[in-house]
Image: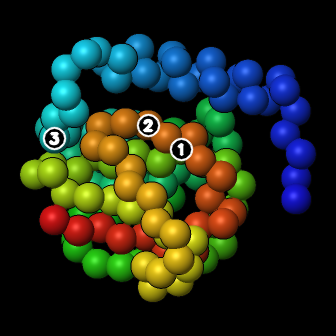
Amino acid sequence: MSRISIRTKLAALAATGVLALGTGVLAAAPAQASDHTVDGCRSGFACIYTEGLGSHTVEWARDVAGTYNLSNMNHERWVLNNQTGNWKFRLCTGYNGTGSCEYMPIDRWQWRDITPINSVIVSP
């Protein structure tokens, strides 16, 4: 199990705040379906970025409903649900959409440790 320094945690928190301010996430309005590309994640897609706090490169993206097993994805990464039409994006600890699954909110960046995530579900 890796240990994350307090400096790394604070940097991640600060970056999350900066991204939130830059994308209007801190606004009081309810989440709306995305209508634009965000850092390479096209409108209508659920995306996982390459490893690293400063990453702006999409490594995984889907806009078709289904359950997808992940491979060779570890460590902390940005996750973005940039879907439209209230589609859902869930990260699951088991393969084939099993185990504990967590919903990713629409139009919200999430800084997540992907190591325990083995599959994702994209659904209407």
> Disc 3, disc 1: CB below 8 Å?
no
Q: Amino acid at mark 2?
A: Trp
- Quarter occupied by residue 38: top left
Q: CA distance from mark 2 to mark 1?
A: 7 Å
> Disc 2, disc 1: CB below 8 Å?
yes
Residue 33 got which mark?
A: 3
Give the residue at mark 1. Answer: 78
99 left or right of 44? right
Taking the view exactly as shown, the residue that stands out farthest to the front is 100
Give the residue at mark 2. Answer: 109
In the rendered view, would you say 90 is above or below 108?
A: below
User: x, y (%) of residue 30?
Assistant: 19, 28
8 left or right of 91? right
Q: CA distance from mark 3 to mark 2?
A: 14 Å
Q: Earlier in the sequence, mark 3 or mark 2?
A: 3
Q: Amino acid at mark 3?
A: Ala
Q: Mark 1: few, some, or many residues within 10 Å (few <14, many ≥20)?
A: many
> Disc 3, disc 2: CB below 8 Å?
no
Tell which of 71 and 56 is nearer to you. 71
Q: Secondary structure at mark 3?
A: loop
Q: Amino acid at mark 1?
A: Trp
Q: Earlier in the sequence, mark 2 or mark 1?
A: 1
User: x, y (%) of residue 36?
Assistant: 20, 36
Residue drawn at (52%, 50%), measured in percent from left and top?
49
Residue drawn at (16%, 41%), measured in percent from left and top?
33
3 left or right of 52? right
Q: Secondary structure at mark 1?
A: strand
Q: Secondary structure at mark 2?
A: strand
12 left or right of 56? right
User: x, y (%) of residue 2?
Assistant: 88, 53
Number of numbered tags placed on the structure image: 3
Q: Mark 2: few, some, or many residues within 10 Å (few <14, many ≥20)?
A: some
